[in-house]
Image (tube, rainbow, N blue to C red):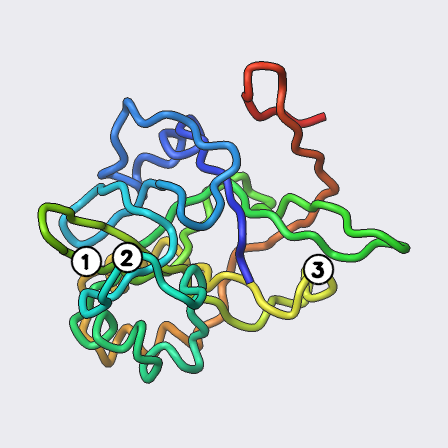
């Protein structure tokens, strides 16, 4: 599962050789949750989209079910995602970290999950466009898979993290090539660190 993440622009720029289409003027997003805007990369470049995919055929952008995550095992067949999959509407959501709340002792504790190398995590996603009247709604979902051994204690699911060498293949490869990536384990070494997110008097997010 993935229900929150952060996007630090400085982290993206440090890896400019991989994220060649990430703009210089994107603001940091410290605590992105479902239905909020986030930066994504697709075959055409950078676009901001809302997190929780709204399929083009939906009657309304407000769905009665959750679509912020899509399981790799069923993404090709679930009605909400299968058209985007068949149309190769694939994207990547680069994040500096994502968050999970495992039970530690008798309470849930927020943990920040990131690459030990400090590189952004390239989360595999799908995008879609919903149009109704004068409204156009760009949205995405994050694909999830079974976790790597180092963080399997945190949650029984994790985002599908792409290795940098497979970024171009995910965005521009054939359906067959993309399907193979669904079951390819990541080479990223991940760590989970206890973390506290709280809001200041102005509403700004910061950690302690």
Gap between marks 1 and 3 measured at Cα: 34 Å
Local SS, label 3: loop
Gap between marks 2 and 3 measured at Cα: 32 Å
- Taking the spot 18% from the left edge, 62% from the top edge, the residue there is 172
- Give the residue number, with chain letter if any, for mark 3: 154
Q: Residues within 10 Å of mark 1 (few under 14, many from 20)?
A: some
Name the mark on residue 61.
2
Earlier residue among tags 1 and 3:
1
- Give the residue number, with chain letter if any, for mark 1: 130
Residues under numbered marks 1 and 3 in contact, where contact means CB atoms less than 8 Å apart: no
- Taking the spot 22% from the left edge, 41% from the top edge, the residue there is 46
Residues under numbered marks 2 and 1 in contact, where contact means CB atoms less than 8 Å apart: yes
Q: Which image quarter holds the C terminus? A: top right
Earlier residue among tags 2 and 3:
2
Can residue 166 be seen from the camera position used here?
A: no
Name the mark on residue 116.
none
């Amino acid at each position: 599962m993935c229900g929150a993440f952060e996007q630090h622009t400085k982290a993206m720029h440090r890896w400019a050789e991989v994220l060649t289409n990430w703009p210089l003027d994107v603001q940091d997003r410290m605590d992105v949750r479902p239905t909020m805007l986030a930066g994504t990369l697709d075959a055409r470049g950078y676009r901001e989209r809302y997190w929780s995919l709204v399929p083009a055929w939906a009657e309304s952008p407000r769905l009665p079910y959750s679509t912020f995550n899509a399981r790799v095992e069923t993404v090709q067949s679930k009605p909400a995602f299968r058209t985007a999959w068949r149309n190769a509407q694939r994207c990547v959501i680069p994040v500096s970290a994502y968050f999970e709340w495992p039970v530690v002792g008798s309470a849930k504790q927020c943990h920040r999950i990131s690459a030990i190398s400090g590189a952004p995590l390239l989360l595999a996603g799908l995008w879609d466009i919903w149009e109704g009247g004068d409204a156009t709604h760009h949205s995405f979902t994050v694909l999830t898979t079974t976790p790597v051994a180092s963080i399997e204690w945190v949650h029984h699911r994790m985002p599908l993290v792409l290795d940098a060498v497979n970024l171009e293949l995910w965005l521009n490869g054939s359906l067959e090539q993309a399907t193979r990536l669904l079951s390819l384990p990541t080479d990223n070494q991940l760590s989970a660190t206890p973390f506290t997110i709280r809001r200041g008097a102005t509403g700004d997010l910061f950690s302690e």
